[in-house]
Image (spheres, coloured by chain):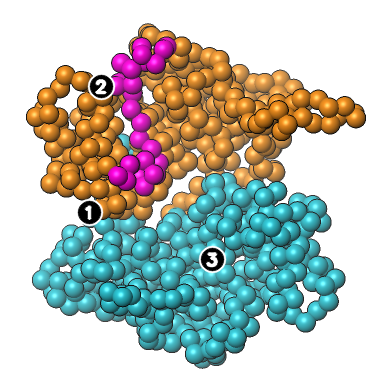
Amino acid sequence: MNHLLEVKDLEVKFALRSGELTAIDGVSFTLDKGERLGIVGESGAGKSVTGFAIINLLSRPGYISAGKILFEGQELHRLSEEEIRKIRGDRISMIFQDPMMTLNPVLTISTQMVETVLAHRNVSKADALDLSLENLKKVYIPSPEKRLSQYPHECSGGMRQRIIVAIALLTNPSLIIADEPSTALDVTIQAGIMDLLLELCETEDMSLILITHDLAVVSQVTEKIAVMYAGKIVEAGSTETIIRDPKHPYTQGLIKALPGSLQPGSRLNQIPGMMPTLTDIPLGCAFHPRCTINATVCQMETPALISVDDHDQMTACHMVK
Amino acid sequence: MEKITNSILTVKNLIKHFDISGGLLDQLKVEKRRFIRKRTTVKALNGVSFSIMPRETLGIVGESGCGKSTLARAVLGLYPPNSGEIHYQNNRIDNLTPQKMLSYRKKMQMIFQDPYASLNPRMTVKKTLEEPVYFHNASITSREVKDKVAEVMQQVGVDPKWAGRYPHEFSGGQRQRISIARALMVDPEFVVADEPVSALDVSIQAQILNLLMEAQEDRGLTYMFITHDLSVVKHISSWVAVMYLGTICELVSTKTLFESPRHPYTQALLSAIPELGRKKPKHIKLKGEVPTPIDLPTGCIFHGRCLYVNNRCTHEIPQLIQLDSGTRVACHGVEEERI
């Protein structure tokens, strides 16, 4: 009960006419207060679905078919829509990828901020406005008074993402789930947003789940990493260990595929093939068709996520002892 | 880089402005109680000059809105430039009639960013690949085309058996392979790749970059490689042009760029790239945001955000100057040895 968030054996299914698809297959992790976790993986790995499942944002035909989500002692997966709304946007805030889509284009910034405060707090409109202004200052928006009366289209992409961070902060959440918060932004803007998130986590004692495909970004910001592949966590542990000494062939492949680490012009280490679709996830280890090892046991049995090397590092691979 | 004689492509002082003022009513503005007619132009390229040597790769980097893609399209003649010259192997090509341009189009091909948007969903792979060949070579026999399709598909790593399939039956990485195949079908010499790997996952990105490097090796291709990803540029290109608001602020060999970036913007850009596992010292924070290309700043276009700005920067436009290290940089501060 000491963890801020505990996800246990989470399973998410999508009920389609052609049958049920398992998008998340037994994902478990914990997050303590003030901790920052990165969920890394390529498109289709199930990172975003995991984020959505935590705050019950899955829309039909997706549903949580098994497992537990405990947050501050509450079982989130059992809450009714009305009850979860008291937590979502209040104790847990979410930041989405595309700042152009997240804000309502026909409402001013102040309307959208005040609306959020009033939905969760019993305060006057004037107080809500003051709080909004204060939060815009926290995210270093120049001339925040002016911004309040503006519409989203009057702000640049980076500015919008800062405003979204400010909205997420309005209720002093203990956890922020950020789904690819900087992917749509330029590098210089991305660096600014990541600095901001890191600083806020420290000053406000917030926890962060950072969902991204970018290992480099994760390694700058988080303390723990979970690498996902085809709906499962294949490797987890402290950021430092995983980057320095990845054990799972997929993590190794991902790190080696980055162009930064090699002699320019040399051949990049590619992982052959591609991530399987949910309709035909291979038997045994889902990674075996792309893996360099690919032993018989890999094709027969699904490897469990087990500890390696006495560290806090966990790997799901038959070949890692 | 200087001599035109050896280069495959030379661009001189290219300017491209887009008029976005709309109809007459949109142009009318009230000023001092009188109606005036005012045009609005986006100044996408403002005097860009560079050249590319055969078999080399020039990387063009910069953030969104800096004119990278406009440059790519202008070079291929997809946008007529307002002024400036484009030379392809010593022949000026920016003022040619569409008829005369045809023979160059065969030599210059393009690969686009989004493999979902750049392939016609209603054409099979076979048709997509055949079309450019028939277009540029009317006398070719269908037998030859068929062999060519199979050969190029093999080369880009798509099984020729799948030639009868439609684009939606392929994944993003495979579609990008097909886009590359389409560009290679007419045996070009020069390929412009506009963010060819930006829409792909890391493991697929490595596959496509390897494919592009192999094709360059086998066919002796010259690339103009446009991307916002500096680690990709570092890996694939021999030269890099860093763009900001429609101008080149630094033009330099890749090695020198990463060892000693000179322009303040390049320095900020490089410091912002997240690096795997290495916690960086604080990156250089730029003031403010990229100004709009409709209202360009006077003087050095970067002066509003620069940490080393002085009076000269605000009114005099810096020209690209060559330093001893071979770096060409457009910055008064570097010229005056302040930076």
The color chain B is rendered in = orange
Disc count in the image?
A: 3
The amino acid type found where label 2 is placed reads His
The label nearer to you, 2 versus 3, is 2
Q: Chain of mark 1?
A: A
Residue named by callout 3: A178
Q: Picture quarter containing residue B237? A: top left
Residue named by callout 1: A272
The amino acid type found where label 3 is placed reads Ala
> Can residue B89 be seen?
yes
Crowding at dot 3, Cα within 10 Å, few <14 / some 14-19 / many 20+, comes out as: many
The percent position of residue A248, horizontal first and vertical second, equals 28, 66
On whether disc 1 and disc 3 are found on a single subunit, the reply is yes
Mark 2 falls on what kind of element? helix
Chain assigned cyan: A
Which residues, given as a range, are shown in magenta? Answer: B96-122
Q: Is residue A8 left or right of residue B166?
A: right
Q: Chain of mark 3?
A: A
User: What's the mark number on residue B136?
Assistant: 2
Q: Is residue B17 left or right of residue B242?
A: right
